[in-house]
Amino acid sequence: EGQLAESGGGSVQAGGSLRLSCTASGVSFVSVDMGWYRQTPTKEYVLVSRIDKGGLTDYADSVKGRFTISRNHAKNAVDLHMDNLRPDDTAVYYCATGLPFNPLPEKLTSAPTRGLNAFGYWGQGTQVTVSS
């Protein structure tokens, strides 16, 4: 069964940068979306960014121009480079993949579990804390 493992979270001051990495194992994800979510204070999981199998990217309005997503098919991995971080970027960030012919949803209202869910695979999360 497939698994996702995130790394790269941490604490930075406002204006700083972090790079999140997610490595997938057990299943090839080259033909599906890969992306990153973060949990809001209202406990929803919102899509921060996604990248499809062809490299087409999508970003939440709040991170456009500051975050960059990239993927490496050979390594079955996806990265999120975050620049000019703000305190409201503070959250747990989760790596996720979609399923064939099903893009990652914009929002998840129920808490996914690590591993396979109805929408795809979910990682364990990594904390990002931005101080002012």
Image: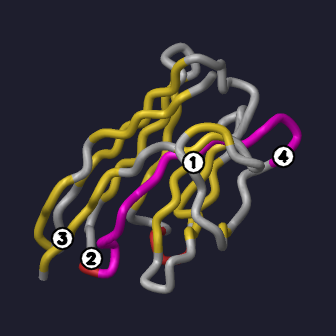
Residue holding disc 2: 86
Residue count near mark 3 (Cα–Cα under 10 Å), binned few <14, some 14–19, many ≥20:
some
The disc label shown at residue 35, or none: 1
Q: Is residue 103 left or right of residue 132?
A: right
The disc label shown at residue 15, or none: 3
Give coordinates of residue 23: x percent, y percent.
Answer: 44, 28
Are the residues flagged by discs 2 and 1 in contact, CB closer than 8 Å?
Answer: no
- Residue 34 appears anywhere in the view: no
Residue in the image at 58% along x and 17% along y: 26
Q: CA distance from mark 1 to mark 3?
A: 23 Å
Q: Secondary structure at mark 2?
A: loop
The disc label shown at residue 107, or none: none
Q: CA distance from mark 4 to mark 3?
A: 35 Å
| Amino acid under disc 3 | Gly
Judge by depth and name the residue closer to the eye, 41 or 30. Answer: 41
- Over which residues does the magenta segment extend? 88-102
Residue count near mark 1 (Cα–Cα under 10 Å), binned few <14, some 14–19, many ≥20:
many
**In front: label 3 or label 2:** 2
Judge by depth and name the residue closer to the eye, 106 or 42. Answer: 42
**In front: label 4 or label 3:** 4
Are the residues flagged by discs 1 and 3 in contact, CB closer than 8 Å?
Answer: no
Are the residues flagged by discs 4 and 1 in contact, CB closer than 8 Å?
Answer: no
Q: Earlier in the sequence, mark 1 or mark 3?
A: 3
Are the residues flagged by discs 4 and 3 in contact, CB closer than 8 Å?
Answer: no
Residue count near mark 2 (Cα–Cα under 10 Å), binned few <14, some 14–19, many ≥20:
many
Q: Is residue 29 left or right of residue 87?
A: right
Instruction: Inspect the magenta stretch and tell me whether residue 52 lies in it.
Output: no
Image-quadrant location for residue 88:
bottom left
Residue in the image at 56% along x and 75% along y: 44
| Amino acid under disc 4 | Asn
